[in-house]
Image: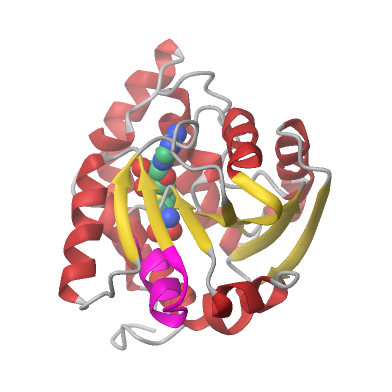
Amino acid sequence: MLVDETSPYYVVGAFDCAAGYVENRPKVQAAFRTGGGVAWGDQPGCVFCAIARFFRPGYEANIVEKWLPALDGVVEKLKAGARVADVGCGHGFSTLIMADAFPNSEFIGFDFHDASIEEARGHAKKHGAGDNVRFEVATAKDFPGKDYDLVTCFDALHDMGDPAGAARHIHQALKPGGAWMIVEPFAHDALEQNINPVGRLYYSASTLVCVPTSLNQEVGTALGAQAGEGRLREVAKSGGFRQFRRAAETPFNLILEARH
Ligand SMILES: C[S@@+](CC[C@H](N)C(=O)[O-])C[C@H]1O[C@@H](n2cnc3c(N)ncnc32)[C@H](O)[C@@H]1O
């Protein structure tokens, strides 16, 4: 848990996150007095690195082995050669893990935070990533392309100012038969069900990072990190998706699949 960075139980990222949240408190407190937010790029220290570090072991252990196989027919397409957009990719670990596992497919990681995209390009170089992966600055509502077989959002949808607008854009960007994989922090639908150690961790993150990030953007929906499946289903449906189901879960993640 504390020393092996490759273990799926590695939790040191959570402590790094907590340190960043504490540092963020004065900005968030001031913003909440006026109903405003705090831009993702104005988070202190390296909250971005901390979040990437917190989720990465779970991604290494689950994306290729468990989450993608839980989606309907997606692994077969990825093996044969598919086009994938990873939206809100941050430092790009999820994108790189998928690109490495499926060399016949093309992966583009998009994020609106240019410093994170720079970081993702650096990781790609450092890890000797193939030429089937690249990273571009774009928002979830304007990333280019209309022919994706798969769009993924890892722990990013609830941070967006306009998740329903993002859902609409993703709906248009997918080919017929394409899938949207939404990975969100694990949560039940009701607050009382989330009062447990994982919920406590996520509600703190939500208050000090996710909600201010969303409030800083257009619309400012502020879903929060404990939105739960019911609320996320509404977002997907409002974007035009008719099919929606829980494909998998871990104590930390909900893996949802939406289709036309
Ligand atoms: C909690 S981080 C997750 C990063 C990465 N997917 C991961 O799992 O480690 C949320 C990411 O969403 C991005 N983001 C937030 N709002 C966005 C928007 N409207 N369009 C594109 N990216 C956005 C942020 O810049 C940030 O990198």
Q: Residue at x 63, y 77 (%)?
A: 75
Using the image as rendered, state which of residue 124 and residue 43 is in the foreground. Answer: 124
Q: Position of residue 117 (x, y in %)?
A: 25, 50
Q: Position of residue 96 (x, y in %)?
A: 36, 70
Using the image as rendered, state which of residue 220 and residue 146 is in the foreground. Answer: 146
Residue 71 in the figure: left or right of residue 49: right
Location of the N terminus by quadrant is bottom left
Residue 56 in view here: yes
Q: Coloured how?
A: secondary structure
105 part of magenta stretch = yes
Q: Residue at x 42, y 66 (%)?
A: 94
Direction top: furthest residue: 34
Residue 9 in view here: no
Q: Position of residue 209 (x, y in %)?
A: 40, 40
In the rendered view, would you say 11 is above or below 37?
below
Where is residue 54, by image quadrant?
Answer: bottom left
Direction right: furthest residue: 242
Residue 82 in the figure: left or right of residue 216: right
Q: Residue at x 57, y 34 (%)?
A: 166
Where is residue 194, by image quadrant?
Answer: bottom right
147 part of magenta stretch = no
Residue 164 in the figure: left or right of residue 209: right
In the rendered view, would you say 150 is above or below 137?
below
Number of marks in picture: 0
Q: Residue at x 50, y 28 (%)?
A: 161
Segment tinted magenta in the rendering: 91-106
Q: Position of residue 13 (x, y in %)?
A: 34, 67
In the rendered view, would you say 171 is above or below 238?
below
In the rendered view, would you say 27 is above or below 242?
above
